[in-house]
């Protein structure tokens, strides 16, 4: 079968854990994609642990949980963000210059590190935020040029919205990389820090036998390969329908609801 066949058969049984990207899979700009809420409920009713694994680092954990609750999805303790993964790359007591949103500041503080906005620092952590300015670029690049480590929460070039893609956290990170002439270590999907975060949450065996559902093969698909688990690709996000998807998914669906129906054998 071709990589664009929407009826690629499922290779194994219902997983113990399903990992869901948020933007483009569950919602677009916090507007639920039709069928996603019902699909999540059906998975949970079938005894599947659902974790939301997002490269969006701008929001705090409570904000993510609240936004999911607003569309009818309980999510307390089930949200993992690239900011949390980024925090694994800093040590307690380190000074971290935050070039990102409140989610990064929260994750850094929970790690026991010190979030700063200027001055001497051990690391610079860059994530998606809508208040990025030339001055923030200058401060971040200067800190890296004078010895701070550069960490990106994610390198997604775009961010899906109901009106179409907009520049994502990777676009901001690219500006800091170019301005500082330094390549960042990236924490989010598809890289190892986020994989470590998932393993901490569910255990190594459950992570390897999980199903990752995403809309961006370069992050979600490669993340599934990083974990050693299966990948289900949906057309409801950033990937144009019919595009060649690499790595090749184990399952295709129009949206999350379609994927869930296939997983449950409906």
Image (cartoon, grey):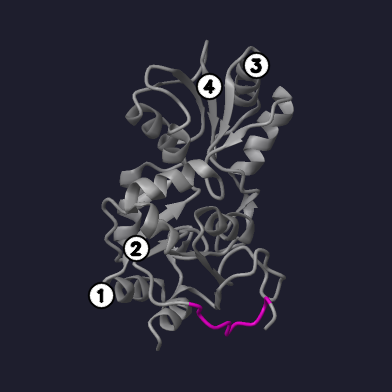
The residue wearing badge 3 is 142
The span from disc 3 to disc 1 (Cα, nearest Å) is 51 Å
* 18 horizontally vs 174: left or right: left
Question: Considering the image in quadrants, where does the N terminus appear?
Answer: bottom right
CA separation in Å, label 2 and label 3: 41 Å
What residue is rendered at 35% in x and 70% in y? 40
Point 37% across, 21% down: residue: 92
Marks 2/1: CA distance?
11 Å
Callouts 2 and 1 close, C-beta under 8 Å: no
Q: Can you say whether 106 is above or below 245 in the image? A: above
The span from disc 4 to disc 1 (Cα, nearest Å) is: 43 Å
Location of mark 1 (residue): 45
Rendering quarter of residue 108: top left
**Mark 3 surroundings within 10 Å by alpha-carbon count, few (fewer than 14), some (14 through 19), many (20 or more):** some
Image depth: mark 4 or mark 3 in front: 4
User: Could you say which disc has been placed on residue 123 in the image?
Assistant: 4
Q: Quickly name the residue at label 2.
A: 50
> CA separation, marks 4 and 3?
12 Å
Q: Label 2, secondary structure: give it.
A: strand
- Residue 248 location, quadrant: bottom right
Q: Are marks 2 and 3 in contact (CB under 8 Å)?
A: no
N-terminal of the pair, mark 3 or mark 1, is 1
Question: Callout 3: helix, strand or loop?
Answer: helix
Q: Is residue 222 left or right of residue 71?
A: right
Residue neighbourhood size for the residue with mark 1, other residues' Cα within 10 Å, grouped as few (<14), some (14–19), many (≥20): few
């Amino acid at each position: 079968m071709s990589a664009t066949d929407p009826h690629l058969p499922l290779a194994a049984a219902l997983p113990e854990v399903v990992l869901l990207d948020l933007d483009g899979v569950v919602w677009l700009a916090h507007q639920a994609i039709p069928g996603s809420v019902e699909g999540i409920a059906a998975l949970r009713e079938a005894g599947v642990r659902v974790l939301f694994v997002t490269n969006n680092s701008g929001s705090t954990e409570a904000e993510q949980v609240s936004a999911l609750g607003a569309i009818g999805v309980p999510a307390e303790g089930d949200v993992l963000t690239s900011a949390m993964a980024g925090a694994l790359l800093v040590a307690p007591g380190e000074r971290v210059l935050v070039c990102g949103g409140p989610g990064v500041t929260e994750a850094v503080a929970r790690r026991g590190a010190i979030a700063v906005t200027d001055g001497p620092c051990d690391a610079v952590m860059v994530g998606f935020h809508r208040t990025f300015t030339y001055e923030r670029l200058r401060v971040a690049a200067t800190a890296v040029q004078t010895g701070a480590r550069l960490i990106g929460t994610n390198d997604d070039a775009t961010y899906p919205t109901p009106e179409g893609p907009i520049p994502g956290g990777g676009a901001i990170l690219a500006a800091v990389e170019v301005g500082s002439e330094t390549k960042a270590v990236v924490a989010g999907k598809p890289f190892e820090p986020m994989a470590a975060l998932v393993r901490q949450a569910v255990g190594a065996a459950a992570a390897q036998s999980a199903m990752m559902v995403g809309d961006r093969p370069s992050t979600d698909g490669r993340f599934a390969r990083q974990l050693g688990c299966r990948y289900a690709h949906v057309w409801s996000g950033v990937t144009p329908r019919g595009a060649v998807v690499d790595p090749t998914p184990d399952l295709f669906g129009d949206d999350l609801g379609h994927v869930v129906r296939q997983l449950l054998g409906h």
